[in-house]
Amino acid sequence: MKKRSIFLVLLLSFGLLVACSGEKTTSNTQEKKEITIGATSGPYSDMVNKAIKPILEKKGYKVKVVEFSDYIQPNLALANGDLDANLFQHKIYMETFAKEHNLDLSEVIIVPTAPMGIYSKKFKSLDEVKEGSEIAIPNDPTNAARAFLILQDAGFIKLDPSANPLTVSEKDIKENVKNLQFKPIEAGQLPRAVESVDLAAVPGNYALAAKMNLLDALVLEKMPDQYRNRVVVNTKDLNKPFVKDIKEAVKSEEFEKVIDEQFKGFGKPEWMLKRKQ
């Protein structure tokens, strides 16, 4: 009888240990329902707040949005765990930053992005642009390449066909139809330059920050997806449920409706355009 009692005590103890272990496992594998998303102040924090956060909240998430005023901290905050995802950068920047800082980052999905445009206070159309006009362009290589591609699409210059379109520069210009004069300026100063030069190639985020209307541009770029912003996470989180839900939110019709109504002029990524075909 005594042996039987000891056996029952041991069995109950083992059962309790298994139950506690099971509860711990369930707790550890429980889906993450509180997420923090970082974005640069302006259109992309607005996009998270207006077009992504409401959809995630309907899925049961509590979403905190953190705004940044620079392009360094959002990735560092993501890497150290202060953020679960961020939205502010294109593919080239993400890959370069990750390599330089030894980070393991991955994109989730590309989002509609404010395109670079050619703006002018002197000309109302591209047809009015005169011989020898001065155009302010970004002084950083990535954005300068974008400006040259817009000018080529508009018929103002011809670039060396063998040049990499992501890195083209003034030295790759083979023909300058209007003999345009290029004035490199720091990208953030380009909205002000519109007042003082004939033309200015202004990146969309800086145009919006300066309260410019994207649709006032003489021409907007046909932006390759490499230059569109994307939601980015740590690679180790790429297959987690909250990341899949962020992707579903961006791919929803509700998200696109908000973009169409409140982010006019934003260029849509290829995946979004293809589903309309």
Image (spheres, rainbow, N blue to C red):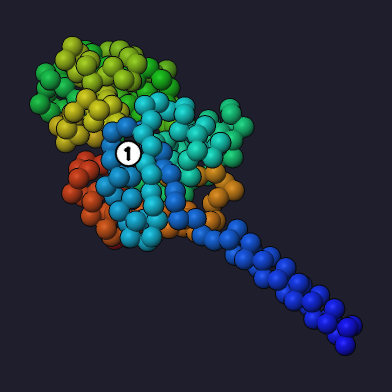
Q: Is residue 212 left or right of residue 31?
A: left
In the rendered structure, the answer to whether residue 258 lies left or right of residue 113 reads left
Helix, strand or loop at label 1? It is helix
Closest to the observer, 159 or 28:
28
Where residue 110 appears, x then y in whole percent? Answer: 40, 47
Front residue of 169 and 275 = 275
Residue 137 pos. (x, y %): 31, 19
The residue that disc 1 covers is: 45
Residue depicted at x 12% and y 20%: 121
Query: Where 156 sits versus 272, above or below?
Result: above
Q: Is residue 201 left or right of residue 108?
A: left
Amino acid type of the residue tagged 1 in the rendering? Ser
Marks counted in the figure total 1
Give 161 or 137, whichever is nearer the viewer.
137
Q: Position of residue 154 (x, y in %)?
A: 24, 31
At label 1, counting other C-alpha atoms closer than 10 Å, the crowd grade (few under 14, some 14-19, many 20 or more) is many
Q: Residue at x 33, y 20 (%)?
A: 187
The quadrant of the image that shows the C terminus is bottom left
Q: Is 79 located above or below residue 125 in the figure?
A: below
Q: Position of residue 130 (x, y in %)?
A: 15, 17
Residue 100 visible here: yes
Q: In this rendering, does residue 274 appear at all?
A: no
Residue 179 is left or right of residue 239, and the answer is left
